[in-house]
């Protein structure tokens, strides 16, 4: 009987949401090591290319110090048109982002990159459309006061209070939360990770 070699996985992210999502599909990383990379947006970045570049950079950076591991990097980018709505630096920026999202459709790009122990990489970018209702000043104030926007791309968390502002999405829900599960599972399968 052939036994598979011990497969070890590192999640190159500090996001508790990504860890929870992986656990949801029965994947339990052996290590969680946030990648310290430069996440600055360059002039040549589109929302799609930024999500992929950051996901790949995270996986590669963490892999340098951990031979023999699969390394999963991921990043989420929210955009309205070509404008990228990063993680807001303060409540004023979060308020501006919410006003921009109000009554509009936005796109969430989830970049996922998986690096194998043999340094083979597979990656995907998943796009989900999100429609926001028109937000009143009172709703924006309430949401800002909740603090839920902190550390969230686009300044909202669909799995929390903000869900009541979103009448519809088109595409992967888990992508909006932080990791497109179907596509991540397919990357893992394709690279032979089947723990």
Image (cartoon, rainbow, N blue to C red):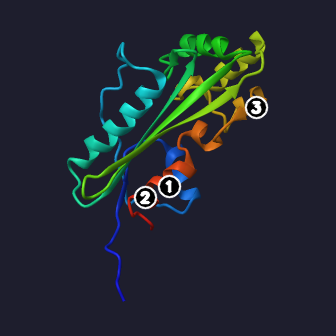
Quote the CA–CA distance across marks 3 and 1: 26 Å
Residue tagged by mark 2? 190
Residue tagged by mark 1? 186
Residue 113 shows up from this direction: no
Quarter of the view holding residue 14: top left
Left or right of 64 in this view: 85: right
Q: Secondary structure at mark 3?
A: strand
Q: Which mark is residue 43?
A: none
Q: Position of residue 188 (x, y in %)?
A: 44, 57
Residues at circles 2 and 3 in contact by the CB criterion of under 8 Å: no
Residue occupying image coordinates x 41% and y 34%: 52
Residue occupying image coordinates x 35% and y 67%: 7
Residue occupying image coordinates x 71% and y 33%: 169
Left or right of 133 in this view: 48: left
Looking at the rendering, in which quadrant would you find the N terminus?
bottom left
Left or right of 15 in this view: 100: right
For marks 3 and 1, the one nearer the N-term is: 3
Residue tagged by mark 3? 168
Q: Position of residue 144 (x, y in %)?
A: 64, 19
Residue 146 shows up from this direction: yes
Q: Position of residue 161 (x, y in %)?
A: 71, 32
Residues at circles 1 and 2 in contact by the CB criterion of under 8 Å: yes
């Amino acid at each position: 009987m052939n036994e598979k070699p011990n497969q070890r996985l590192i999640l190159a992210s500090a996001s508790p949401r990504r860890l929870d999502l992986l656990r949801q599909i029965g994947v339990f990383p052996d290590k969680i090591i946030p990648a310290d990379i430069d996440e600055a947006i360059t002039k040549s970045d589109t929302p799609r290319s930024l999500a992929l570049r950051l996901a790949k950079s995270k996986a590669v950076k963490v892999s340098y110090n951990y031979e023999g591991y699969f390394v999963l990097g991921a990043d989420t980018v929210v955009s309205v048109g070509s404008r990228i709505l990063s993680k807001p630096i303060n409540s004023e920026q979060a308020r501006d982002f919410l006003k921009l999202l109000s009554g509009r459709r936005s796109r969430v790009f989830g970049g996922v990159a998986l690096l194998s122990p043999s340094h083979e990489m597979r990656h995907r970018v998943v796009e989900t459309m999100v429609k926001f209702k028109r937000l009143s000043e009172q709703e924006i104030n309430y949401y800002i006061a909740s603090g839920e926007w902190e550390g969230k791309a686009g300044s909202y968390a669909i799995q929390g209070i903000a869900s009541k502002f979103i009448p519809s999405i088109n595409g992967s829900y888990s992508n909006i939360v932080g990791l497109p599960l179907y596509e991540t599972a397919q990357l893992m399968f394709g690279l032979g990770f089947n723990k």
